[in-house]
Amino acid sequence: MESPNQSATQGFIFSAFPYSWGSSVTCFIPLLFIYTFIVIGNLVIITVVQLNAPLHTPMYFFIGTLSFLEIWYTTATIPKMLASLLGEKTISLNGCLLQMYFFHSTGISEVCLLTAMAFDHYLAICSPLHYPTIMTPRLCAQLTLGCCVCGFITPLPEIAWISTLPFCGSNRLEHIFCDFLPVLRLACTDTQAIVMIQVVDTVHAVEIITAVMLIFMSYVGIVAVIVRIRSAEGRRKAFSTCVSHITVFLLFFGSVALMYLRFSATYSLFWDTAIALAFAVLSPFFHPIIYSLRNKEMKEAIKKHLGQAKIFFHKTEDLK
């Protein structure tokens, strides 16, 4: 007879990964490429922002912080996915709780930071004369710290509640990483699990809807100012300031909303996996592209440092 805490002692088994070697390798290679690109791309953004004095502005400070969070956001899940594709597809309960905590804490921090960035754009466009005195380095640091504190505190009650639940019977986790709802479905106490699912749904809904409403109101004010700008060049310049943020916001929040604003609705394992990949892998993959290739100042700074690197290597070769 199985002990009531079998899953707690032996761990969960990810059942969404392919079990054939050929399929696993086929998934492993692109996922490894994407993760490598995410880490290197975001490190490039952080480095370029730090090394270029013209980029020492609130907007690029937030972009650099977002890049830092993106590295840890993806590191919370993708390395374990890669290991599961080629090796053991198991994870202990403690490992699962830690993965959920860091994935959601960095994710919520990003949500808060994207909201702060919308506020920054609103001030820059709607109050350009007062912007330097309002959005000071001190306020930037306070907003960033507040976003991280909010992000790392918010998931704690959910993680604490889940850690007290007994797990028995099946330990097959129908997902590609540990997330609240798939783990809660494996809890033994049906009544408590149902209540927990409703609580988790409500918490996520409040977080997402609050952020979306704040960002939406910021852009309503921004659009109202942009349409009153007389010159087409002025309107284009004002809009280009926001387009990267809007793109990241739509990519990230679109997939997150599909996963966490469904309440009692259920998806098939295929769609659960596809949506999870969208906000856990694909959205972070496009982040460095959006903030580097679509940003003129960032592109020029990257080209400048690439040129300096080439000169350095040429000089090194000549000395040899």
Image: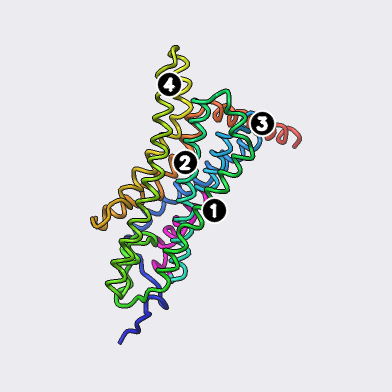
Amino acid type shown at disc 1 = Val
What's the colour scheme? rainbow
CA distance separating discs 3 and 4? 28 Å
Amino acid type shown at disc 4 = Ile
Q: Do the residues labelled 3 and 4 touch (CB within 8 Å)?
A: no
Where is mark 4, residue-wise? 226
Quick one: 94 or 293, which is closer to the camera?
Answer: 94
Q: Which of marks 3 and 4 is in front?
A: 4
| Mark with earlier residue (1, 4) | 1
Q: Quadrant of the C terminus?
A: top right
CA distance separating discs 1 and 3? 28 Å
Where is mark 3, residue-wise? 53
Q: In the displayed orientation, state which residue is furthest to the bottom.
A: 1
Spot occupied by residue 138 in the image (x, y as percentages of width and height): 64, 40
CA distance separating discs 4 and 2? 21 Å
Q: Is mark 3 on a helix, strand or loop?
A: helix
Looking at the picture, does residue 31 appear above or below residue 84? above
Where is mark 1, residue-wise? 149
Which residue appears at 52% of the width and 43% of the height? 66
Q: Nearer the viewer, mark 2 or mark 1?
A: 1
